[in-house]
Amino acid sequence: MTIEHKDIYKIADHHRFQWEKAQDCYVILFPEGMVKLNGGAGEVLNLVDGVATVATIIELLTVKFPDAPNLEGDIIGMIELGLEKAWIQKTN
Amino acid sequence: MAEQNNGVSSATTTTQPLWLLAEITYRCPLHCAFCYNPTDYDKHTQNELDTKSWLSVLNQARDLGAAQLGISGGEPLLRDDIEIIVEEAHQLGYYSNLITSGVGLTDKRIDAFKKGGLDHIQLSMHDITEEINNFITDTKTFQLKKKVAAMIKDRGYPMVLNVVIHRYNIGHIKEILEMAEALGADYVELANTQYYGWSLINRNQLMPTKEQIDHAEMVTNQYRDKVGNKMKIFFVVPDYYAERPKKCMNGWGEVFMIVTANGDVLPCHSARVIPNLEFPNVKDDSIKGAWYESPAFNKFRGDEWMKEPCRSCPEKENDLGGCRCQAFLLTGDAESADPVCSLSPNRHVIEKAVLDAQNPELQAKPIIFRTDKNSKRINEGEEKDRLSEFHSVP
């Protein structure tokens, strides 16, 4: 699936995304599984909330990390991975 | 370097428990021949932890980092405080899972679980035929399970069907998967019987042949290709037909913690079979102390405890020498290589077990079902011959 700027994604049904203090990272929890997300991946999925478009996510993270090279590519890559793993789903 | 303390390595760990399994009661209305619960469980049915203790366990384990919670048993629904436990788990931020046979799940209770924030339900199924369902569980529960599956879907829960596979149902994999799909299962676990507890003493009655396992796996793969992501299917390969042992529990005391009905804190379901290990109990010990400091949890962390051929094996990080309980049960030495490994000097024990299970004379011995009565009899020293047939004496 091609990721477009107008697309809106949310955390997939039956999955939960939350901050884990003890692990010091974001995680995704689902039946029989738990995935720890590294810093960048966690930042992206934290904005995948069923409201923000991909364009908004890119904009927000560009403000937050102005010096990161190829930020848009990384964000799109993370959304693709989330879709492939069925952690997130498209809403529009 | 790990210090040596009464022969127990006190290597420190930096890992945190991620999964907490609450084996909240050993009481169970089913009598499954393949149950992994200890055969002596009856002695723990009178001293179950109370509600307050369980809430404390949940809080303590969550503080350490546990995020996945399984509420299991026995049959957890035999306790009337699951609603309170589920609500607390949700408030603490656990992703909680009720692991049930379905017996005792009413509309009122499932609504309370939904309201309390239970995240998913894992239902055990046994076969497509009423005959085999009722035979292997020694109950009449076939119709009930279909009804419960419908209730779970009706409340919008993700449904995990767990089907323990053995000689009696291994020929029905395709039909079982069709049934699961028709019931709307989101996940199906085809869990080939592993041999611990009751299943170990019924091994000759339960173990399928290698050909049956290979066929079942092929059928599973075909079905997986057909159904895609709509229903995720897990096929758990049985140890005895593997060449290398499993990385049991992902490592002793690495990510899993089990608290049993009577409050024992264990790194795996059957750890208490290993002699001379004193496990912490939540009545006397904190969860934190149990995880980080107890000699039992530190005993098989790292690789200092390993003997040859594991110690110098280039693959030791992949499997950590396999399952400590299986090593003890089958060789009498918990520090030896899991005999499942083809490099183990004890591999012949597995080969003999496989041959025995195909011996019609041994197959014909009666199944010892998991009942309170049988557990009492075993505790009173009956069935000694049957037990010693399957448990190696050190």
Image (spheres, coloured by chain):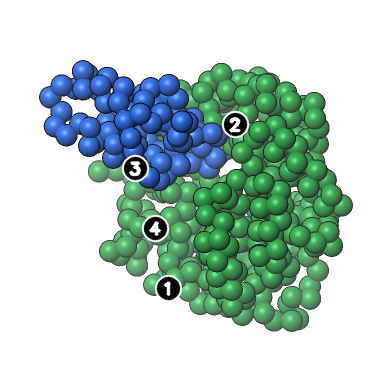
Chain colours: A blue, B green
Q: Are marks 1 and 3 on the same chain?
A: no
Side of B324 where B82 appears, left or right? right
Relative to B363, residue B99 above or below: above
Crowd class of label 3 (few under 14; some 14 to 19; many from 20; radius 10 Å): few
Label 1, secondary structure: give it. Answer: loop
Mark 1 is on which residue type?
Ser
Residue found at x 54% / y 31%: B95
Residue found at x 65% / y 38%: B121
- How far, Cα to Cα, is label 3 from label 4? 39 Å
Q: Quadrant of the N terminus of chain B?
A: top left
Q: Are marks 1 and 4 on the same chain?
A: yes
Observer-nearest of B222 and B329 = B222
Q: Which chain is indicated by disc 3?
A: A
Among numbered discs 2 and 4, the one appearing first in the sequence: 2
Using the image, tell me which numbered label, if any, was put on residue B342: 1
Label 3, secondary structure: give it. Answer: loop
Residue labelled with disc 2 = B119
- Circles 1, 2 touching at the beta carbon (< 8 Å): no
Among numbered discs 1 and 4, the one appearing first in the sequence: 4
- How far, Cα to Cα, is label 2 from label 4? 31 Å
Q: Which is in the foreground here, disc 1 or disc 3?
A: 3
- Circles 2, 4 touching at the beta carbon (< 8 Å): no
Mark 3 is on which residue type?
Thr
Side of B309 where B364 appears, left or right? right
